[in-house]
Amino acid sequence: MLYMNNNHDGFIIEMLGITKDFPGIRANDGITLRLRRGEIHALLGENGAGKSTLMGALFGLYKPDEGVILKNGKPVTISSPNAANALGIGMAHQHFKLVHNFTALENIVMGVETTRMGLLRTDQARRQVMALSERYGLKIDPDARIEDCAVGTQQRVEILKMLYRQNEILIFDEPTAALTPRETGELARVMKELAAEGKSILFITHKLGEIKQTARRCTVLRKGRSVGTLLVADTSIETLSEMMVGRRVDLNIQKSPARPTASPLISVERLTVRSKQRQKPLLNDVSFEVRGGEIVCVAGVDGNGQRELAYALAGLIPADSGRIFLCGKDVTRMTARSRNTLGLSHIPEDRQRYGLVLDYTLEENLALKSYFRHPFQRRGFLSFTAMRGHAERLTRDFDIRAAQGPVTRARNLSGGNQQKAIIAREMSELPNALIAVQPTRGLDVGAIEYIHKRLLAERDAGKAILLVTLDLDEALIMSDRIYVIYEGSLTACFEGGKATARELGLYMAGSGNVG
């Protein structure tokens, strides 16, 4: 099953014996990876397996401690992202490298701007960007500020930024984490088209179905080492998942029947949120309930109001009209902390912007919502002993892999381990109600299995769970009821187990209304 070739013919990139150490951990341990010209090569591994570090070395973000990188059989030194771009290597990052107060267009052309007599000229760049957007189905508003864009839109800007530079070696780091199934299918088509044009693609993903759909070969990493390189067509999804996590994984969740409480724990009445420009509502007259003991899902194409719904419920943005009740109490005008105190937890869609303080340690982030309460606060002083013990327990229970344990800076965690940290904190709060926005985004299959089981355990313990997801499979597997949101309104409601992916997809595209 191993697929190896020791000559340089056909390899555009070879990473040979790459080793990279960080304080307390060896992220890459003698890894060899060879990329053929015109192929899509998947890189698979658990959260923290070393995938992003390896690609960071190829893109000039890290300098390997050992090993050599060859391009077209010749050694190259990649000292920075600019050096990588000069070699024709581009990267669409999992954690977006975007300037939030710049527009989408400004982010795409930044660093390769066209100027005339010292003035920035964007007319030609705009035409090129919109042509790329149209050609590859990556819809954006070029004049929208990144800070106002949903995660899925920011992901598309990252990809367009790379395509605009006409790189020949393209690194996609978890590119579908924030995309809908339809957008994911479109991206697979885009990658195949780019490969047919002669581009060489390295594709990092946790989604095994995407690997089968797109890649010719796959290199599997586990705990910083290469487990093997395989021909995808000859390898089953079960084999890939077992190689990745070192054990069999079961994602066929067995749910017990829901036993919802008589009274809702979350109740929303005619909720409306308008844009800053006070034009068309981003969320329009939305009403629904979530009872204890059930998982209610809101499904829709990214940018249709899910973001505003979750933020309004969590108290991060104000509602223009309507009311929000938590455990029977009107919390519409309450602060986020007051809602948390009443038993509301929130897993946000953007883990780095809203979920973590990146320069805080892991133990500080895990106590971020409860540091002012016993046992973390005593007589006005923080108890770091209590915080350390709390962090050690959650790190163990949720398998958060941190090189320096509880004192690891949050920004030094892999994306998946950042997500696990947020989920651990929110679930450890023992909430009455949980808003989970894309809770498994960027997680490997083993972690997804674990999180799904934890969500079901919370539901079976009588908690109310509002699940907001772009993953139709997750919506269908996990939900007791599914609402479809389109252009800020709820357009359909399905009982769990009675909807199909095709039906949901049609309503998500704007077909039908609530009956």
Image (cartoon, rainbow, N blue to C red):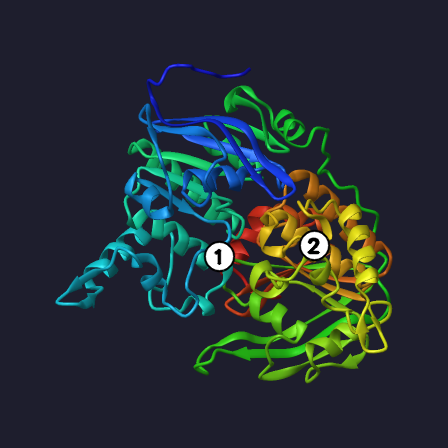
Toward the viewer: 340 or 97? 97
Query: Which amino acid does the dot numbered 1 rest on?
Result: Gly
Q: Earlier in the sequence, mark 1 or mark 2?
A: 1
- Verify CB contact (< 8 Å) between mark 1 and mark 2: no
**Which quarter of the image is occupied by the N terminus?**
top right
Q: Secondary structure at mark 1?
A: helix
Q: Position of residue 462 (x, y in %)?
A: 86, 60
Quarter placement of the C terminus: bottom right
Crowd band around label 1 with a 10 angstrom C-alpha radius: few (<14), some (14–19), many (20+): many
Of residues 186 and 151, which is closer to you in this image? Answer: 151
Residue position for label 2: 407
> The disc labelled 2 sits on which kind of residue?
Val
Camera-near label (1 vs 2) is 2
Asked if residue 4 is positioned above or below residue 309 in the image, the reply reads above
Residue at which label 1 appears: 152
Q: Quadrant of residue 342?
A: bottom right
As displayed, is residue 480 above or below residue 215?
Answer: below
Q: Quadrant of residue 277?
A: bottom left
The percent position of residue 478, horizontal first and vertical second, equals 71, 50
User: SS for tag 2?
Assistant: helix
Residue at figure coordinates x 61%, y 71% from the top left: 311
Residue placed most toward the observer, 140 or 417: 417
Q: Count residues near mark 2 (Cα–Cα under 10 Å), then give few for <14, some for 14-19, many for 20+.
A: some
On the rendered structure, is 118 left or right of 6? left
Q: Position of residue 473 (x, y in %)?
A: 63, 45
Residue 63, quarter of the rendered image: top left
Q: CA distance from mark 1 to mark 2?
A: 32 Å
On the question of residue 296 being in view, the answer is yes
Residue extending farthest left: 117
Residue 135 in view in this figure: no
Residue 138 placement, left or right of 295: left
Point out which mark residue 500 bears: none
